[in-house]
Image (cartoon, rainbow, N blue to C red):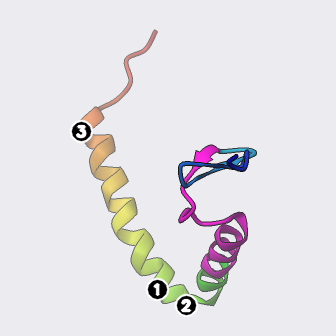
Amino acid sequence: MASPLLISGDVLGPRYGKISPHAPTDDLLLRHEVLAWLALLCRSTAAMNAEILPLRHEVAVLRRQVGAPKPG
């Protein structure tokens, strides 16, 4: 008789339902998030400004395309 946790090679996760045995575990996802935060903390101010400047430009262009809101 097959184990209740294994159904045709798929693992049943408590929160995710049926997941692949090759899916990343919560531990790996947490490590990824921590490393991403550390990478952000290590970035220089110039690198952050270089990323923010085009985003601000894009927001300005989109605001011009939408136009002013109509009152009422």
Q: What label sits on residue 65 in the rendered view?
A: 3
Looking at the picture, how far across and down is residue 25, in whole percent? Answer: 66, 65
Q: What amino acid is at disc 2?
A: Ser
Report the residue marked by disc 2.
44
Q: Is residue 26 left or right of residue 7?
A: right
Looking at the picture, how far across and down is residue 57, in whole percent? Answer: 32, 60
Residue sitting at 73 percent across and 71 percent down? 27
Q: Toward which corner of the image does residue 37 lie, by quadrant?
A: bottom right
Front of the two marks 3 and 2: 2
Q: Is residue 48 above or below residue 59?
A: below
Mark 1–mark 2 contact, CB under 8 Å?
Answer: yes
Q: Toward which corner of the image does residue 39 lie, by quadrant?
A: bottom right
Q: What amino acid is at disc 1?
A: Ala
Q: Secondary structure at mark 3?
A: helix
Q: Secondary structure at mark 2?
A: loop
Q: Nearer the viewer, residue 61 or 21?
A: 21
Looking at the picture, how far across and down is residue 31, in whole percent? Answer: 69, 77
Q: Which residues are magenta?
A: 17-36
Q: Is residue 50 left or right of residue 22?
A: left
Residue sitting at 46 percent across and 9 percent down? 72
Q: What amino acid is at disc 3?
A: Gln
Q: Earlier in the sequence, mark 3 or mark 1?
A: 1
Give how far apart the Cα atoms at labels 3 and 1 are.
28 Å
Q: Earlier in the sequence, mark 3 or mark 2?
A: 2
Q: Nearer the viewer, residue 66 or 43?
A: 43
Give how far apart the Cα atoms at labels 1 and 2 are.
5 Å
Q: What label sits on residue 47 in the rendered view?
A: 1
Q: Toward which corner of the image does residue 32 lie, by quadrant?
A: bottom right
